[in-house]
Image: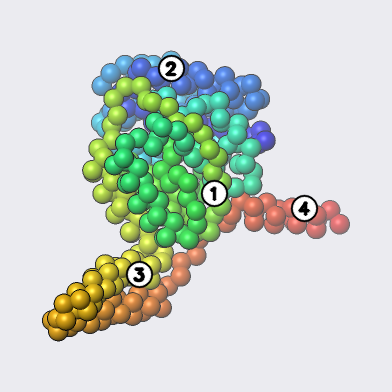
């Protein structure tokens, strides 16, 4: 397991009920594992006793005088962190601190280690499950990889690797979604570790409709930026479906109009396919600003072996 020092970054907005307990459990776990650490709490415009508690239990407190959002809080905490290795987690008691060593075990081989949430509390209502299925499918379509949990708030990564991506990583609630997509689309390696997810303490700050639309926007933006042909492939789907239904209507009813509409819909889908190939040819391939940690360490080892000869 990685034993290098770690900075724990915790965003907190009106979380006085659970903050002290969460920090205490994190420290206990890291001390038992023999990991040197610091706790950085970002108090994001809290109006309750969160700031006072943070000053008691944290090694470093960053205060936003007004509420700037989840992603902006994480960016502030990452900027303020002393160590390169980072752990982010929430202050509401939903993530289990006892599983931190399980994530750290993979930190020397993967660029990001994500606690993939499980359990009834995570899955939630039927509407939430459907939304997660849709977003998961879109994300996996965009990246070509399996993504068990795209927006888990408990993950380990390195400051030096994520800072170059700050300009394109969301400063809102979708910080975790964006960072997952950015890492995968730039060839970085992510390991998912199943963890339990608990019911939060206090009041949720999530707006389901607003945050769902924002997440959808971010996924589509990522597709357009990194693999535009897939965006046009997505746009084709409803047109091909419409062409099929119109052709079926024409076959069953013998309607010439239905066949004409089917040809028109199929032509539109074909045009979108052509535009997708054109966009893929014209959009320059961007080079990742960072190298995967496994590649860097392999090069370091080769260099050390060469110097030792």
N-terminal-most mark, 4 or 2: 2
Rendered location of residue 272, percent (x, y): 29, 76
| Residue positioned 43% across, 27% down in the render | 198
Going by the image, does 156 lie left or right of 125?
A: right
Asked if one can make out residue 264 in the rendered structure from this viewpoint, the answer is no
Q: Residue at x 56, y 30 (%)?
A: 99
Q: Do the residues under discs 4 and 2 have CB atoms within 8 angstroms? A: no
Instruction: Name the residue tied to disc 3.
Output: 233
Point out residue 251 in the picture as x, y percentages from the top left corner: 22, 79
Q: Are the residues tagged 4 and 3 within 8 Å (C-beta)?
A: no
Q: Earlier in the sequence, mark 1 or mark 2?
A: 2
Task: Name above or below for residue 63 compared with residue 267.
Answer: above
Q: Upstream in the sequence, badge 3 or badge 1?
A: 1
Number of the label disc, if any, that sits on residue 304: 4
Cβ–Cβ under 8 Å for marks 3 and 2: no
Query: Considering the numbered disc 4 on the image, is that residue within a helix, a strand or a loop?
Result: helix
């Amino acid at each position: 397991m990685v034993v290098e020092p770690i900075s724990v970054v915790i965003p907190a907005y009106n979380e006085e009920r659970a903050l002290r307990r969460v920090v205490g459990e994190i420290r206990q776990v890291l001390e038992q594992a023999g990991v040197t650490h610091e706790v950085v709490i970002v108090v994001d415009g809290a109006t309750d006793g969160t700031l006072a508690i943070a000053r008691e239990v944290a090694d470093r407190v960053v205060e936003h005088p007004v509420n700037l959002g989840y992603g902006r809080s994480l960016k502030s905490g990452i900027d303020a962190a002393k160590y390169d290795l980072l752990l982010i987690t929430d202050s509401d008691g939903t993530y289990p601190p006892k599983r931190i060593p399980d994530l750290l075990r993979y930190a020397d081989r993967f660029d990001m280690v994500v606690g993939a949430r499980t359990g009834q509390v995570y899955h939630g209502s039927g509407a939430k499950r459907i939304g997660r299925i849709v977003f998961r499918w879109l994300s996996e379509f965009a990246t070509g990889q399996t993504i068990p949990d795209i927006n888990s708030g408990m993950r380990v990564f390195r400051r030096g690797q994520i800072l170059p991506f700050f300009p394109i990583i969301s400063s809102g609630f979708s910080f975790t979604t964006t960072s997952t997509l950015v890492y995968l689309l730039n060839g970085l390696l992510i390991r998912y570790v199943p963890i339990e997810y608990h019911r939060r303490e206090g009041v949720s700050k999530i707006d389901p409709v607003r945050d769902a639309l924002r997440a959808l926007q971010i996924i589509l933006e990522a597709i357009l930026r990194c693999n535009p042909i897939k965006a046009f492939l997505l746009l084709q789907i409803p047109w091909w479906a419409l062409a099929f239904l119109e052709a079926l209507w024409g076959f069953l009813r013998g309607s010439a109009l239905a066949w004409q509409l089917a040809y028109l819909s199929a032509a539109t889908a074909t045009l979108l396919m052509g535009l997708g190939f054109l966009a893929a040819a014209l959009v320059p391939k961007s080079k990742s600003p960072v190298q995967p940690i496994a590649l860097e360490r392999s090069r370091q080892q080769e260099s050390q072996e060469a110097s030792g000869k």
